[in-house]
Amino acid sequence: MIKIRVGDIQLGPEEKKELQDVIDTSRLSEGPKTAIFEKLWAEFIGTKHCIAVNSGTSALIAGLYALLYDTRFPKFKKGAKVITTPLTYVATSNAIVLAGLEPVYVDVDPRTFALNIQQVEDLLKSSDPDEYCAILPVHLMGYMNDMPAICSIAKKYDLVVFEDAAQAHGSILEGKKAGTWGLLADYSFYIAHNVQAGEMGAVVTSDDRLRELVVQVKANGRFCKCRTCTRSKGYCPHHDDDFEPRFTHEFIGFNFKISEFQSAIAIPQVKRIGQIIADRQHNVKHLNELLDSFKTRLDLPMYSPDISYLAYPLIIKDPSINRHKLMLDLEKAGIETRTLFGCIPTQQPSYSGYKSRYNGRLPNAEYVGTHGIYIGCHQYLKQDDIEYIAATISKILITNSLRGA
């Protein structure tokens, strides 16, 4: 039986009150609760706008389609290239491909999983920069990329910076939060994330036109793009006898709308997100202290009070440690584990068509993809849980060492 999950959620009295409000009003599709969530999240991140969608994947797709529909960005066209990471959840690459764009991969830093800046620069120098439209860095596990360098390169080559901040709720670099460096950013509120709503995502931006386009894309491209719908008050400023904005579609889009239940669960968590981040940081720091004697065998996560940790990643350095066996032993002890995603173009079957092009070119991503795991560090873990995790890992590694396995 799993005792310690990668992600967990406990619905307290605040969440239950918000959910009961939704039940009492019988308004299930997105409405006032979603508007409150969007306002709170934009304020927390530090952007002008937040648009809620039904998943982090949808946020990526909606953001990319908005850029494709925005005439201010002529480099965004079908077949244009997007520089991104090979080491992350596959949704990032999927969104790029589904938008009709081409992902182009550079290697990563093996400790922070951030894009190799020199390789980004070399790639653009050695090819036609007009073939590229964007850089899409992923702040994996809460670790931020070198955003000053990325923004500088993007400006030099006239590229859009779209941050995938799905796993970096509140991470900070040089005083600025993840999601505020680029033109837009996406977030996920899946169960393992710092703010958890089951299934939900968001796009943030301070650009008014992009907000309108994302709002349209997420609702099948319909004309409606008002910040607050006034139909519940009996009127619509855009509706007349010849024009119905709800059923007039300006673009081809998707149904990425959410329910009020998701927003209701998220609202109280956004209000206490500072404590959530602090609790996760405490857990990471304490685990590092307890596992310090094994740092020659495992790369423990780098600690910083500026990182908002999604989970506790471990990279195996000792060749005597078998990842599969380590994960099985942890699961048998009740500690849920995950592999660290894998190198997309060389280790994911769905991207096998890219394999020959990238074989041998992404050594760090491939190493982490075959030697990385992560476990939970979430805010619901108690002191006893942290000590149990450390003791279990210690026992497994010591036994492994004695057996020479």
Image (cartoon, grey):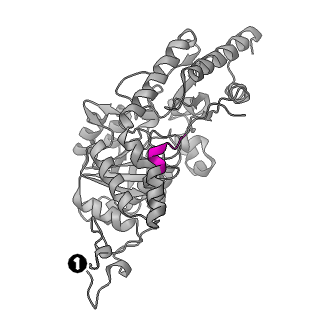
Measured along the vertical axis of the image, is residue 243 above or below residue 191?
A: below
Measured along the vertical axis of the image, is residue 363 above or below residue 132?
A: above
Q: Is 97 or 260 nearer to us in this picture?
A: 260
Evaluate whether residue 92 shows in this view.
no
Q: Is 360 or 380 nearer to us in this picture?
A: 380
Three-letter amino acid code of the residue under disc 1: Pro
Number of labels in the image equals 1
Q: Which residue is mark 1?
A: 237
Q: Which quadrant of the structure image shows residue 53?
A: bottom left
Any magenta on residue 140?
Answer: no
* Residue 263 percent location from the top left of the image: 42, 54
* Residue 25 percent location from the top left of the image: 43, 65
For image coordinates 40% across by 28% down, the residue present is: 278
For image coordinates 30% across by 31% down, the residue present is: 173
For image coordinates 44% across by 27% down, the residue present is: 279
Q: Which residues are magenta?
A: 9-16
Q: Is 357 or 51 nearer to us in this picture?
A: 51
Quadrant holding the C terminus: top right
Evaluate whether residue 115 shows in this view.
yes
* Residue 142 percent location from the top left of the image: 42, 34
* Residue 8 percent location from the top left of the image: 56, 38
Q: Secondary structure at mark 1?
A: loop
Local crowd size for mark 1, using a 10 Å CA cut-off: few (<14), some (14–19), many (≥20): few
